[in-house]
């Protein structure tokens, strides 16, 4: 048996469980419940425009916050001694080993109106805040859950930057800020981009975070899809049409990343 | 990278770690609370742990999760290893599009993967007379695990010196023998890595399971989701404390072992240099 034929069973598997499901999604998206061709599933989507805008806005804010918070972490981490780096790296990744439902649930106790944050604020004599069941709570939940996915790819790119390059820039008279701006940031761009993909895509399709921290008040694309398949609205045709839009977002990110010349490993940050 | 981080850098790192661990700390503390409240501390008690271990639905969900994760990890590791070796030996004209299809489940939003698989299972089920359940859940988990296994193994395959395989064949190995005696040992770290990734992904998955499990079977994450929606019970806190502590202890053991091995290697190297 020739080695190249080894992949034939898996090619069959992919045809069945990767390609066929997507084809079925397309079939659903372009048909009526009776099975006739239609474009209505897409043209009717206008009523969901507010949901689209809200999802994009919140996912965008969460992604920006993850870059703002995560980039310095990755940068500081890369400058630590290697033993310290390993320990800190593990500490940053460790929360990911706890199920994200549980971590999100924990935020409920912190953000509730009578929760720990407000208890702390009134202890200090400060006015309390209303966060739970608002968009702020959902964004906090997204940033909390997805921050490690931003730190990881940026860190893995920064740590690989050739030190000689930085030394050469210093020797040629560049100060630290100039080195950071002209060398480190451009060289870490592929890491930022894969981080953006790993944060934006799950954020824009989130539906658990919105239900736990948004309390049903913050309705996003993920909730919309879930509602069409398992929820009250039951309309898999419309749900499929929305899923196709989600796939288009992903494809746009993949094209963008390929443009910046990062390989298939970097694309998922491994 | 020439300079070590200063005070401000360390302080910032501390702040981020506080942000990451504060919720987990809160969960753990309130697992020992004596009342149902998750925000007011009323006293120490172990009752939520006792209740957890007598809660049949949670334990059932836990077993289901472990069985699915173990099966999915082993099956997807075997399948992924074979697939990766196949991909590696293909011409790039075929390999590149196939690895791109392989990447689809990793790149797609989980909810889209879950929804598309559920549509497939429902359509197949209406033809072949089966319902969503353990089987479809397992198929879904294998499907989203294999790509990560392939991704973990591919770099190891690229590192193999092709001459090694050729040499084995020249010395009379059949290709299958070379596969077992040369390729598998060389890519073993990748295979183990893939197995661990698959197992943890499977244990942790909620979204894809939610759409492919049907109504009669529940994994632990699904059970947790159901519990957060109904009445809130600190049993969840007890459960998360146990899970978190197990992972923590496991990681510490692995790392202590690694450090010890490293020191042993250093000592041996030093002894050889003398």
Image (cartoon, helix red, strand yellow):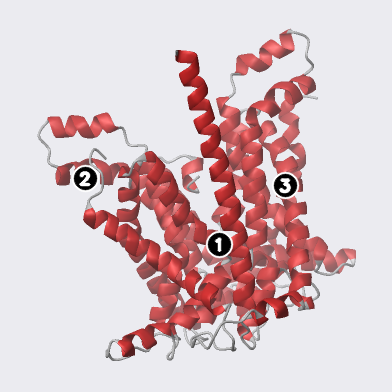
Distance between mark 3 and mark 2 Cα atoms: 42 Å
Total labels drawn: 3
Disc 3, SS:
helix
Disc 3 is attached to a residue of which chain? B
Residue to which mark 3 is pinned: B76
Q: Does B1 appear above or below A120?
A: above
Disc 1 is attached to a residue of which chain? B
In the image, B152 versus A39, the foreground residue is B152
Residue to which mark 1 is pinned: B109
Whether callout 3 and callout 2 share a subunit is answered no
Disc 3 + disc 1, Cβ < 8 Å: no
- Of marks 3 and 1, which one's residue comes earlier in the chain? 3
Q: Is residue B162 left or right of residue B170?
A: left
In the image, B188 versus B12, the foreground residue is B12
Q: Does A259 appear above or below B63?
A: above
Disc 1, SS:
loop
| Residue found 71% across the figure and 57% down from its top | B141
Q: Is residue B187 left or right of residue A107?
A: right
| Residue found 74% across the figure and 42% down from its top | B79
Quadrant for residue B258, please give it.
top right
| Residue found 62% across the figure and 64% down from its top | B243
């Amino acid at each position: 048996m020739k080695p190249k034929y080894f992949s034939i069973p898996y090619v069959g598997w992919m045809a069945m469980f990767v390609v066929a499901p997507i084809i079925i999604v397309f079939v659903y998206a372009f048909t009526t419940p009776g099975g006739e061709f239609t474009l209505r599933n897409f043209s009717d989507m206008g009523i969901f425009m507010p949901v689209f805008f809200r999802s994009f806005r919140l996912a965008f804010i969460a992604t920006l916050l993850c870059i703002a918070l995560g980039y310095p972490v990755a940068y500081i981490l890369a400058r630590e001694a290697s033993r310290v780096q390993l320990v800190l790296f593990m500490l940053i990744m460790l929360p990911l080993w706890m199920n994200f439902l549980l971590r999100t649930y924990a935020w409920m106790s912190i953000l509730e109106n009578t929760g720990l944050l407000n208890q702390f604020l009134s202890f200090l004599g400060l006015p309390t805040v209303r966060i739970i069941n608002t968009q702020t709570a959902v964004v906090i939940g997204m940033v909390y859950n997805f921050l490690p996915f931003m730190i990881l790819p940026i860190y893995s790119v920064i740590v690989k930057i050739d030190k000689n390059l930085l030394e050469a820039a210093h020797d040629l008279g560049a100060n630290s800020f100039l080195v950071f701006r002209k060398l480190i940031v451009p060289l870490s761009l592929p890491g930022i981009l894969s981080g953006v993909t790993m944060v934006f895509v799950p954020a824009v399709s989130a539906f658990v975070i919105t239900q736990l921290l948004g309390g049903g008040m913050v309705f996003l694309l993920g909730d919309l899809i879930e509602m069409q398949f398992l929820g009250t609205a039951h309309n898999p045709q419309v749900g499929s049409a929305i899923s196709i839009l989600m796939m288009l977002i992903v494809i746009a990110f993949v094209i963008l990343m390929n443009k910046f010349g990062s390989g298939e490993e970097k694309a998922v940050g491994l | 990278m020439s300079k070590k981080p200063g005070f401000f850098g360390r302080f910032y790192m501390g702040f981020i770690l506080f942000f990451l661990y504060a919720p987990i700390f809160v969960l753990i503390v309130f697992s020992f609370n004596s009342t149902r409240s998750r925000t007011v501390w009323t006293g120490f008690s172990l009752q939520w742990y006792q209740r957890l271990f007598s809660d049949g639905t949670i334990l059932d969900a836990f077993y289901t999760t472990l069985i699915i994760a173990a099966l999915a990890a082993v099956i997807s590791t075997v399948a992924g290893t074979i697939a990766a070796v196949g991909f590696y030996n293909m011409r790039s004209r075929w390999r590149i599009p196939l690895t791109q299809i392989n990447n689809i489940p990793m790149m797609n939003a989980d909810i889209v993967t879950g929804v598309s698989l559920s549509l497939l299972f429902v359509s197949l089920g209406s033809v072949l007379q089966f319902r969503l359940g353990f089987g479809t859940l397992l198929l879904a988990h294998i499907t989203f695990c294999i790509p990560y296994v392939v991704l973990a193994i591919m770099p190891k395959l690229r590192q193999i010196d092709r001459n090694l395989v050729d040499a084995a064949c020249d010395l009379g190995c059949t290709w299958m023998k070379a596969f077992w005696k040369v390729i598998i040992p060389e890519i073993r770290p990748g295979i183990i890595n893939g197995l661990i990734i698959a197992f943890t992904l499977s244990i942790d998955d909620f979204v894809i399971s939610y759409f492919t499990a049907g109504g009669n079977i529940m994994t632990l994450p699904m059970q947790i989701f159901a519990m957060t929606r109904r009445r809130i019970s600190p049993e969840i806190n007890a459960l998360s404390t146990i899970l978190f502590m197990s992972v923590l202890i496991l990681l510490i053991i692995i790392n202590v072992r690694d450090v010890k091995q490293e020191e042993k290697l250093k000592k041996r190297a030093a002894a050889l240099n003398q």
